[in-house]
Amino acid sequence: MERFYQRAGAPAPDAAEIAGPEVPEPYRRLLVHSRDMTPTLEAFHDCKLMITVLSRHRDGETYLREVLLRPSPERPAVEYGVIRIFLDRLPVAARFAVLAEERPFGDILQTELVAHLSWPQAFFRIQADRHLSRVLGLDLRGPLYGRRNVLVDGDRRLLAEVIEVLPPTEISA
């Protein structure tokens, strides 16, 4: 996330690492697990999700993108994410799908049958700053919850590093 803030000339928001059991509901069930976020959020919100790419940067076989996941262009985002994808470690069809920027990475991994593990590294509470408030359509500067995650293939090679931040979510959703 820091790279995207640096490119915008702004400091990254303050984040405090917290233990999984300290993450409040419903964020705990959405973040504290070893599943992919896309299908987890789709099940929780009972809909398919699409991506909106906010920014991207490619350096050889490393592709970074800042995205929102949302049910439709008219509906609010259900996740803000920053992902660094190692393109050369993906099958050709998955690589092309990533670069097409039409589907979330988790959906691509599922539909292209890319064997992988989701391995959360940390959970955090973050203060919504001006950028996060703007892209998530929030009028508050309160805490948000997220995780730092890595995705590895069957040989434990790193496929992607991800920061996932969830906007305020109703428990009844």
Image: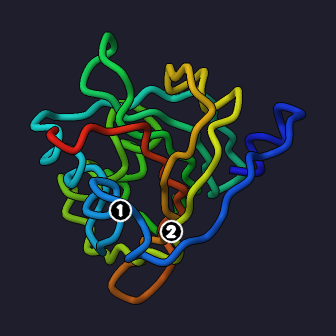
Q: Is residue 115 left or right of residue 8?
A: left
| Residue 103 appears left or right of 171 | right
- The residue positioned 16% from the left and 38% from the top of the image is 173
Res 38 visible: yes
- Please tell me which residue is depicted at 57% across the width and 26% down the height of the picture: 140
Farthest residue to the top: give it: 74
> Which label is found at residue 42?
none
Q: Judge whether 24 appears above or below 32 on screen.
A: above
**How far across and how far down the image is residue 43, in percent?**
12, 48
**Element on which disc 2 rests:** strand
Judge left or right: residue 147 versus residue 77: right
Q: Residue at x 77, y 49 (%)?
A: 3
Quadrant assignment, res 46: top left
Q: Nearer the viewer, residue 77 or 94?
A: 77
Check the image and name the residue furthest to the right.
9
Mark 1 vs 2: CB contact within 8 A: yes
Specify the amino acid type for callout 1: Leu
Q: Is residue 138 above or below residue 144?
A: above
The image's colour scheme reads: rainbow
Q: How many marks?
A: 2
Label disc, if present, on residue 31 of the rendered structure? 1
Q: Is residue 6 above or below residue 21?
A: above
Helix, strand or loop at label 1? It is: helix
Q: Residue at x 56, y 57 (%)?
A: 125
Residue at image mark 2: 123
